Image (tube, rainbow, N blue to C red):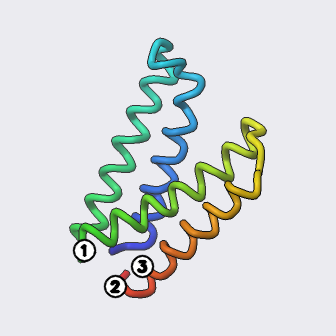
């Protein structure tokens, strides 16, 4: 799995996810189209990463873990969403699981 492609996939998915709010239930065309485009880019990056030697399961889970962390950080920075003890605990668990999976899988 290519770490650069996996990172690009995670960033594309996270940025696409952030557009859900301004897309307003997919009722606003420009942010909705950007959301779909970013998800398509993320999917393409993940597919290329797997094609270049990654295993589907670990690659997908690593990308999703990185995406979750990016989405959390960006939603706090952009939308001012609160950081609570429960959310921080969840971030630690996701980070731990992603790190363990990454260390036990070829990159």
Discs 1/3, front: 3
Residue bearing the label numbered 2: 106
Q: For numbered disc 1, what is the local secondary structure?
A: loop
Q: Earlier in the sequence, mark 3 or mark 2?
A: 3
How many residues crowd mark 2 within 10 Å: few (<14), some (14–19), many (20+)? Answer: some
How many residues crowd mark 3 within 10 Å: few (<14), some (14–19), many (20+)? Answer: some
Q: For numbered disc 2, what is the local secondary structure?
A: loop
Identify the residue at image location x=73%, y=45%: 76
Q: In the picture, residue 89 is in which quadrant?
A: bottom right
Marks 1/2 in contact by CB < 8 Å: the verdict is: yes
State the residue in front, 1 or 88: 88
Spot occupied by residue 86 in the image (x, y as percentages of width and height): 69, 56
Rendered position, 95 above or below 100: above
Alpha carbon of mark 1 to alpha carbon of mark 3: how far?
12 Å
Marks 1/3 in contact by CB < 8 Å: the verdict is: no
Residue bearing the label numbered 3: 101
Q: For numbered disc 3, what is the local secondary structure?
A: helix
Residue 55's tag is 1
Rendered position, 82 above or below 33: below
Spot occupied by residue 46 in the image (x, y as percentages of width and height): 33, 59
């Amino acid at each position: 799995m290519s770490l650069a492609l996996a990172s690009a996939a995670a960033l594309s998915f996270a940025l696409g996810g952030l557009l859900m709010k301004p897309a307003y239930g997919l009722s606003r065309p420009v942010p909705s189209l950007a959301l779909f485009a970013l998800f398509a880019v993320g999917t393409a990056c993940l597919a290329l990463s797997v094609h270049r030697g990654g295993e589907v399961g670990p690659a997908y889970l690593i990308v999703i873990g990185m995406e979750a962390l990016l989405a959390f950080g960006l939603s706090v920075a952009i939308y001012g969403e609160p950081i609570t003890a429960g959310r921080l605990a969840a971030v630690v668990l996701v980070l731990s699981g992603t790190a363990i999976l990454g260390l036990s899988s070829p990159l």
